[in-house]
Amino acid sequence: MANRSTNRTAVPEAKGALDKFKYEGASELGVPLSEGYNGDLTSKQNGSVGGYMVKKMIEQQEKQMAGK
């Protein structure tokens, strides 16, 4: 199946850091995410990684806004 994603990194220079962040989050959640094909993972597993990333980014932004 072809990758038809229209997602684009807003800051291309951050792609490496975002990938690292994604794999760290997957590891913390116990999701066996690997580079390349991950079609054997469930939607729930993949969604949990994305949700975890958003949660952590919001926490970081809140800390920054609070001056911490």
Image: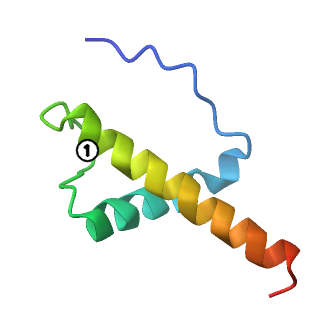
Q: Residue 50: where, in percent of width, then height?
A: 45, 46
The residue that label 1 is drawn on is 45
Helix, strand or loop at mark 1: helix
Q: Residue 8: where, in percent of width, then height?
A: 63, 31
| Position of the C terminus by quadrant | bottom right
Give the residue displayed 21% in from the left and 35% down from the top: 37
Q: Residue 25: where, in percent of width, then height?
A: 39, 63
Q: Residue furthest left?
A: 40
Give the residue displayed 32% in from the left and 12% down from the top: 2
- Amino acid at pointer 1: Gln
Q: Residue 9: where, in percent of width, then height?
A: 65, 39
Give the residue displayed 45% in from the left and 63% down from the top: 20
Where residue 38 sits, quadrant-wise, is top left
| Position of the N terminus by quadrant | top left
Quick check: 10 left or right of 38?
A: right
User: For this rendering, which residue is in front, 39 or 42?
Assistant: 42
**41 up-or-down from 29: above or below:** above
Quick check: 51 left or right of 54?
A: left
**54 up-or-down from 65: above or below:** above
Answer few, some or many: residues within 10 Å of disc 1's Cα (few below 14, many 20 plus, some between 14 and 19). some
Quick check: 17 left or right of 11?
A: left
